[in-house]
Image (spheres, rainbow, N blue to C red):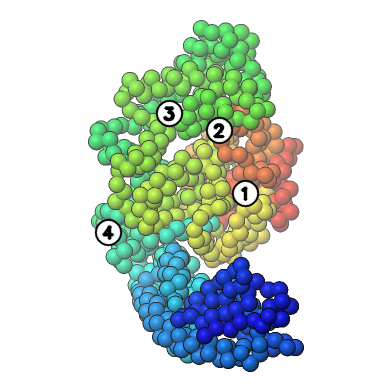
Amino acid sequence: MELKATSLGKHLAQHPYNRARLLHAGVEVSGEKHQYIIPFNQLIQVRCKRGIVWGELEFELPDEKVVRLHGTEWQETQRFHHCLQQTWQQWSIEMSEVSAGVLQQQVGHIQRIEQQDKWFKKSDLDKLQQQIRLSLDAIPMPIIRLDEFDNCRKDYQLCLQWLQRHGLRSVEQRNRQWTERMMETHHDFFQTVESSPLNDSQSRAVVNGENSVLVLAGAGSGKTSVLVARAGWLLRRQEAEPGQILLLAFGRQAAEEMNERIKARLGDVAIQAKTFHALALQIIQQGNRKALAISKLETDSKARRALLIAYWQRQCTEKKAQAKGWRQWLIEDLEWELPEGDFWQDKRLAERLAGRLEHWLGLMCMHGGSQAEMIEQADKEIRDLFSKRIRLMAPMLKAWKNALKEEGAVDFPGLIHQAANILEKGRFVSPWKHILVDEFQDISPQRSQLLAALRKQNKQTCLFAVGDDWQAICRFSGAELALTTTFEGVQCALDTTYRFNERIGEVANGFVQQNPYQLRKPLNSLSKGNKKSVVILPQEQLEVLLDKLSGYAKPDERILVLARYHHLKPETLAKAETRWPKLNIEFMSIHASKGQQSEYVIIVGLCSGRDGFPAVARESVLEDVLLPQPEDFPDAEERRLLYVALTRAKHQVWLLQDREHPSVFVEQLHHLGVPLQKKP
């Protein structure tokens, strides 16, 4: 059947289309120079309109596209429209049956997924949505028409909901219901997997089944308990064999403690916590098929420092340019006072510099690139100065590499680099389905790269990490806080601390969150405390304070004395063993106290100046380039360091200040309600 515009209508309309022809399953519209075929599977609606004299047909297509035919005789237009509607509707009814079959199959798949006894991952939602889109692409008519048909409408709306925000809400609701069911069904597990029952937020974190999960938890909130329970949960649910679970800690002592805890809580399961370096060594040994050892210099700091100082002194002795360069470096960058003449022979200076050389060498090794690549990384304004510093350090780096070669061993940064390269080349096949990481806030780009390489081998490998951005105090070792704050995955928080009382929590949490860039998280305390749970005292009151403590502190109650630097140990403690023999006093730096806890904490050295707290931000240009950039907030890391110190205490904290040279932290703490007292 065909419909044509009248001669006058064609002339007046001046439209590219002036005739229409009904096809087997479509319509052809054409003109003198144009032709357009509209298949029924692209036709959304046909409208028949009457003008003043002539008729008009309007064909609506997807994406709001419209094709019009003008200038046709009205009665002919009506007859053509009627015939077209009959043919099109008959075709639509047949296609609705096909569409209903496609939709029913997809809905059946959705229902099977909803009934599965496991966590519904966001990646699963992505796959489901992709599958729904493929199903809708297979529909033989415009999907916008599916609402017209009773046999399609309900299933189509369900598919549409899963493609929109409702899909995510449905997943979240389903996961909440599944979590509640798991917590009820496995009540005995959550009650007994740790020495004390897991609370609600801990249990929910343990069962979270997303591919990437970061549990943010403040001090004393049971991060390690959650990590151990997670391993136990994977075994209980048979989601992994013991050999498919990799548990990573940041130090040998932490790994040993983790292994003891696993053995005590889970029994003799074949899960062994490793350090990142032990993991790298395993990858290299299996990937290279040859024996490899970690250098003894990495575990013997005394020998390591002696080696570096010996080469430093030799360079300064043999080359005047080197000696001159080092003098400028130590005076200009670090503002050290050096003796005249052969300053490198000064024993105290050498001891002071040894730690710096060790640190700078570690940064260069951690970078892993050539000297030219390091120099290229520096901003143009400081590139010349940085280049000079690199050249001064080059002999130490060469000496270090020679020592490793003679020993036939590798250092820690070399381990990570080699392991990542082996993984990239596919010479090691990861057996791990689940990677569990403790203290994630301390992760460096190098270690993060190793994790990424492991997960790249198997896209299904899940990462479950616990950490606390409020305790990120290891930038000096290359840790980059942004890897925690910009974590790509799901974040959940633990909301209860089992260590310090409410008052200590108010002060510590309020103080660290004065930095607006710190992630916000709840942290409730189980005990109340009082206003004097945190007190600021003059530093000369330490002896009086220990006298008072000796009257009520029990022998098994620990007293931690903490300072910003280890060399700031109070002289009063030299007589502590005999003066207060019943007091269990320990001194350490705040960095060393991380992971520790005690009944009482005394923080000394709240003063300003070179050895002050917060520390004077004085870095070498080497650190400016090779370390992650510091945050754009005054004393951000020092603030977190004080948070760590405050949160070591269960019952009470005393902060000892220098009243003549007060720390800026004293005023800030006082503003938070911490009382200033003259005596304890």
Name the front one of labels 4 and 1: 4
Residue 379 place in picture, x, y as percent: 64, 31
Whichever of labels 4 and 2 marks the residue nearer the N terminus, that label is 4
- For the point 68% across and 78% down, the residue is 10
Amino acid, disc 2: Leu
Whether residue 334 is visible to the viewer of this picture, yes or no, is no
Element under label 2?
Answer: helix
Residue under label 3: 301
Label 2 crowding class (10 Å Cα cut-off): few <14, some 14-19, many 20+?
Answer: some
Residue under label 2: 626
- For the point 61% across and 8% down, the residue is 341
Amino acid, disc 3: Ser
Against 77, residue 661 (above or below) is above
Name the front one of labels 2 and 3: 2
Name the front one of labels 1 and 3: 3
Amino acid, disc 1: Trp
Label 1 crowding class (10 Å Cα cut-off): few <14, some 14-19, many 20+?
Answer: many
Residue 335 place in picture, x, y as percent: 66, 24
Residue under label 4: 241
Quadrant position of residue 417: top left
Question: CA separation, marks 1 and 3?
Answer: 33 Å
In this view, the residue in front, 165 or 24, is 24
- For the point 74% across and 54% down, the residue is 671
Q: Which mark is residue 455?
A: none
Q: Which mark is residue 654?
A: 1
